[in-house]
Image: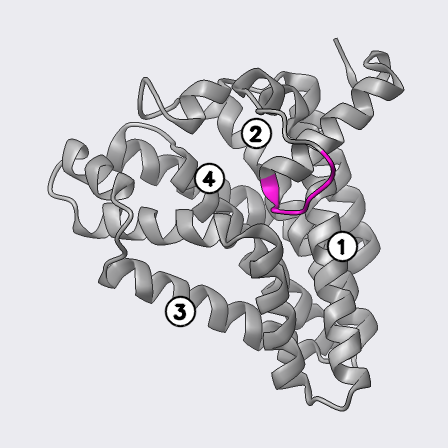
Amino acid sequence: MSLLNTGLAGLASDIKVGVLFCTRLPIGSSAVINGPDVARAGWAMPIAGALVGALGSLTYWIAVALGLPPMSAAMVALIAMLIITGGLHEDGLADTADGFGGGRSREHKLAIMRDARIGTFGVCALVASLILQWSALVSIAEPRQVATALVAAQVSARATLPAFMRFVPAARADGLSAEIGRPPSWSVATATAIAAGALVISLGLTGAVVALLLLSCAGFFMGWLSVKQIGGQTGDVLGALEQGGAIVILLTAAALYRSWSP
């Protein structure tokens, strides 16, 4: 099984699953998505990220065209992407921070992560994530560069998820990660290739290599931490990983773009 022999209908189905799983966009399907569907469609998560980044970039362009300064336009773009995704990954980040930061044992940490309430660690993690992403966009400012950075960040951050699910065991016998299982190797490889292409377009070859190395480091660290803290990964951990990946790419883009400025 590979991407080449899934057929056009299979490709379209995978993309639809990826978009439905990663966003709240209405794309004409009310069918229930099951775990094997998501595992197979893991390669399409970066495509869903490209859509989120493109809509965020369009929002930024419109805000700038209406006369808003970069600081305001950047926040409007982030809010637009939050609405598009329903805060899915942000919720995972907050739950992970609360569980890892406030739990006394593995079972206590997992119980906290399932609690719908948000605690101090979760609030601090969300504030830090939004400020870091916002400050990176403000630093970049130029609309075309913001667009390429946003798309690359959203694509590559979601491309880390299939690999993480394949190589880091699920922490629970039930829940999102356990239901999805391990995405096939071809899906992981395809997602990685899509992310690499987006990073090369946005950051150039050298910048893309740096960004991929930083993403890999973030993934290895998150894998080690989640295994140490709760014995593996959960859907919340995946959300935290996505947010961390987006931050890494936006900060890398901000640093590179500033070095390219005359």
User: Disc 1 marks which residue?
Assistant: 206
- Per the image, the residue denoted by label 3 is 127
Q: Which amino acid does label 4 sit on?
A: Leu
Whether residue 26 is in magenta: the answer is: yes
Mark 4 and mark 2 lie on one chain; the one further toward the N terminus is 2
Residue under label 2, please give it: 163
* Residue at figure coordinates x 49%, y 49% from the top left: 89
Under mark 2, the amino acid is Ala
* Residue numbers of the magenta segment: 22-28
Q: Is mark 2 on a helix, strand or loop?
A: helix
- Earlier in the chain: of badge 4 and badge 3, it is 3
Whole-percent x, y for residue 52 in the image: 69, 53
Q: Quadrant of residue 148?
A: bottom right
Q: Is residue 240 left or right of residue 43?
A: left
Numbered label attached to residue 238: 4
Report the side of 67 relative to 128 (left or right).
right
Query: Could you tell me the amino acid type at mark 3?
Result: Val
Between the residue at mark 2 and the residue at mark 3, the CA separation in whole angstroms equals 27 Å
Q: Residues within 10 Å of mark 3 (few under 14, many from 20)?
A: few
Q: How far apart are marks 3 and 1 (CA)?
A: 31 Å
Residue 239 position within the rendered picture, expressed as x and y whole percent measured from the top left = 47, 45
